[in-house]
Image: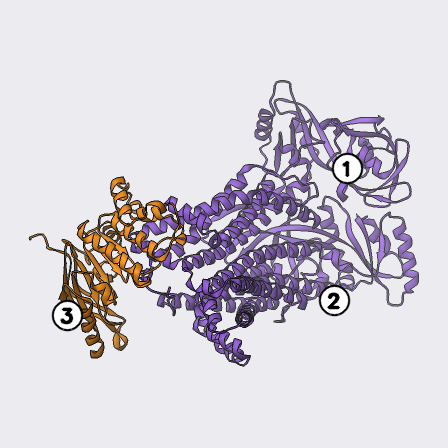
Chain colours: A orange, B purple
Amino acid sequence: MLASRYAVHLTDVTKQYGQGPDAVLALDRVGAGIESGTFTAVMGPSGSGKSTFLHCAAGLDRPTSGEVRLGDQELSALRERRLTELCRTRIGFVFQAFNLLPSLTVEQNIVLPLRLAGQQPDETWLRHIVDAVDLGGRLARFPAQLSGGQQQRVAIARALVTRPEVIFADEPTGALDPETARDILILLRQAVTDLHQTVVMVTHDPVAAAHTDQVLFLNAGRVVDGMVGPGADRVAEVMSGLRRAV
Amino acid sequence: MFTLALQTLGARKGGFVGTFVALLLGAAVLGACGVLLESGIRAGSSAERYAAADAIVTGRQEVELTLKDLDGSTLHESQPLPERVPLKASLAERLGKVDGVRTVIEDDAVTVRLADAHDRPVPGRHGSALQAHNWAGLRLGDFRLTRGHAPRTADDVVLDSALAARAGVRPGDEVRLMTTSVPRTYTVTGLVALKDGRAPRRSVLFLSDPALRQLGPAVQAFGVLADPGTSPGRLAHAINSALDDDSLSVHTGDGRGRAEFLDVVVSGSNLVLLAVAIGGNVLLIAVFVLYATTALSVRHRRREIALLRAIGTTPGQIRRMLASEAAVTALVAGVLGSPLGLLLVYWLRDRFAGHGIVPPDFPLALSPLPFLAAILVTVLTALAAVLISALRATRIRPTEALGEAAVEPTGLGRGRKITGWVLVALATGSFSTGLAQHADFFTLVSLANSLVLILVIATAVLGPLLSRAAVRLLAPLLDRTGVTGYLAAANTRANVGRLAGAITPLVLAVSFASTVVFTQTTALRESTDQVRAGLVADHVLTAPGGVSPDLAAKVRHLKQVESATGLVKSKVVGAGQLLGAQEAVSLGAQGVDPGALGTTIDLHARHGDLSNLSPRTLAISTTAASWLGLGVGDTARLHLGDGTPFRGKVIAVYTRGFGFADVTLDHDLLLAHTTQKTDQSVLVRSADRADGQGLTRALSALAANYPGTVLRDGLAVDDQLAEQRANAWVNYLVVGLIIAYTAITVVNTLAMATAARRREFALLRLSGTARRQVAGMMRKESAVVVLAGVGLGTVLAAFPLTLVALGLGGSPWPAVPGLGYLAIAGITAALAVGGTMAPTRLLLRIRPVEAIGARE
């Protein structure tokens, strides 16, 4: 079999919560491939399943049926511990908030995934990404001493430190003001262009989506549309169309 | 993982305070119990009267019983004997022939009561009984004549100088000594003291050998001096193999002190039991409490753990992190708890001494071992407690880190429901077993204790169900108390899980404390009632050091007296049956003159006829009957207090065993097998048409011949029940520790739960709720917690207490002193309210705008 051109590949992924009449179908036979070295946005109205999509793609949650591949590795075949170990080095995460452990300093937070894996941080790489996210002078501070934007930069640095295959970001700018949000999006863009990373970001903000290479639209658990080279206006148009359809 | 654990500990000190304090206290109590245990096992004082002997031969101070185990196999169990085992004088000759023995010196002793020339009684040091020894025995020990000369005639006596100082006598003065009859006058001819000038542990006096023999002494020991060049060890070995007698013990080195001071050894073995009981109880509660605090701290760290999981921490790493945190906390708590344990053990020793459980100068064996063991046990306990919560923690999904609010899972899992109902069934089973079987008191007490524990665990497991019921009951009431009540009702309705967590420690505190305390008050009430009802004698003669046994006979001859008896107390040992297995039991015994039994003490026979009591028969209480598995007509096989086997037919089973004793024997028989050979009191029943004043005068006149003896109207209930009171006190101590322990959980649980609500408070205030209203809402919420917790705890305690009350007296109502109940419920309630309101006030000081933006 040829090496996959996709960093992440979902085939017929279904995720159902609950049983019987109360069951909620969060993903309904979703198929999607994220190519390496791209910046992808996942969008959709509330309840469209975009968060579940992200969780399943990142191995944080297991699909009810279907297949999730990270590179060549089929995730659903792995046991909990192997899965965690795999994700810790091959996947990076940025959440909306509460990203950092309050008891660790900025530097300790950044290198935590490496320490969990029992690896020594590569000093050159560490300095490189710390410079990239512009945190040079704040490595010894604690998260509580940082602004929201700075905290997100630390989270991005942490996601980058293991040189993962994919970085997943869940509304990374949701809690930030537009100016700071722009900085963070530029940072993620740089990760793709300069560091050749693959980034998948869930967002509901058309302006944020405009920074990406392509957008996947989800509605009622299905991929309903796609857009390459998105502009904010076109994205907003599709989104309002989806909302009306609900 | 370890460094991460350390860092988390450093940063989140607040969350670990509860666990830390619980561990600290646990380590202190366990360390103290360890010291008591070691002191009990190694109990002994350095020898004084036996210090110069190479070996001491005494009777073996324990009796070995052959018992049947559950599976039918036999096992041997030793039970210590409270009375001195006498030796045969003929043993001296056989000892003399053993290789390596140079000289054999007999130590004879008789218990005496000393009075000065004015008939003022002089007790021994620390109020202990005094013994007179033969002068020849002086050579066995370190006593030296410091003044005067040795006793030569039958009227001479030598005192140790400390005793003489207390009696205010000098050589040449007269003192009076009492044994079995009226006092005799002796002249002090000399004083002895220990050669290093130390005050002797027990006061002693010496009589010349012929003078002592007149008083009917018992051979207490043989001291052996070795041939030059024979080591004590070899000597002991030679004696053991030459005599080949199980009923004898040979003591050398430190063992000589144990042979000399029986009180230390006897209280040592009691201390071992106490230490195990207290330590075991505290350990049990500790596991429960620690589980609660660690589970709580894991719950509050849900998001943090989820985040760690999301960035690639394996479940195993999470478990290791939690385990490291627990181990480090426990280690620090254990080390810091050790000095506290040291303070505690001295305090405990003094309290034990105050209640007569150990002698006031009982030496504590201090070594690092108990503390090291306590630290180890503390760490293991903490690890065990964290293990269960860690399992739960690793089930936390990483996706929870992504959500906006930490969602607490609601509802009971299937497994939990099944566990809960199995526990309820178990509790129902043991309750009905207890109801069906009229078992003895101690079985009932242990049944009651385990019943309340099962019930508390069931409460913890089924907590959300119970708190939902409580909310259904209480929320409508809250709703009627204005807007704050409305808010409080809504909060309790919406957070049944949180309420359950808050209620459980209150239930534990109230139900456990009530069960233990009111078991004792019920038993004491029953005992007091029995003493009052059963004592039909109308006059009682007592003396602090005991009453001469011939006084009863003299009283009996007074014409105004219908009957009189000496009352002597001791213990007997027998094979008891507990749930199918046999075990050695020690029972309280009393000796009463058979002719006076019915007219001075009414033991209330349930079966048989008490008037058939003779030196070859015995009567037993209902408790003893169920314990020993005997009924009227059966033959009892027992050992008296000095180890002498006794076989006798049970002629009656009586109900008033709590107030008096479990075994009633013939007075003269029991008296002969005690060390002191004195009566505790003389019970007198006046003749029907006696002239009351004349009798009082006649009795007082008789008593005047026996220094220290006084006439009383009735038996002092306190004296009669001294042992039970001491026992009750130990139980109160355990309760105190348990309350202290649960207090930590109560405060910790509520404080942490309240602190987690800072955003909620901020939101309330930003939407127009006044500070005072938030406080009011919290007050009402804590009222729900207190009402539900205390109420449920009270209900749970009712079951075991009903069992105990039924077993004791047949009435289902336990004795619950209102003040005692108020204290238990009040302290618990105050802790709960304080634990909620103090953090509430702190949180309300923060500006709401700050609090609402704050990270958790």
Amino acid type at image mark 1: Ser
Of the pair B390 and A38, the residue shown nearer to us: A38
Q: Secondary structure at mark 1?
A: loop
Q: Give coordinates of residue B666: x percent, y percent.
A: 72, 54
Residue B410 picture location, percent across and down? 38, 69
Q: Is residue A3 above or below residue B782?
A: above
Looking at the image, the residue that sits furthest to the top is B229
Q: Which residue is mark 3?
A: A225
Estimate the x, y position of residue A99 in percent, counting from the top left: 33, 56
According to the image, label 1 marks what residue? B203
- Which residue appears at 67% of the width and 50% of the height? B571
Host chain of mark 2: B
How crowded is the residue under tag 1: few (<14 C-alpha within 10 Å), some, or many (20+)?
many
Residue B210 visible in the picture: yes
Q: In this rendering, which labeled residue sits more in front, label 1 or label 2?
A: 1
B552 displayed left or right of B425: right
**Residue at 47% of width from left, 67% of height from top?**
B762
> Looking at this rendering, what residue extends furthest in the left direction?
A1
Question: Do the residues at discs 2 and 3 belong to one chain?
Answer: no
Q: Which quadrant does the C terminus of chain B fall into?
A: bottom left
- Nearest to viewer (mark 1 / mark 3): 3
Q: Label 2 crowding class (10 Å Cα cut-off): few <14, some 14-19, many 20+?
A: some
Residue B761, position as x, y percentages in the image: 48, 68
Whichever of callouts 1 and 2 sits on the residue coming sooner in the sequence is: 1
Q: Amino acid at mark 2?
A: Ala
Dot 2 corresponds to which residue?
A: B533
Task: Check contact, mark 1 vs mark 2: CB within 8 A.
Answer: no
Helix, strand or loop under label 2 = helix
Q: Is residue B440 visible?
A: no
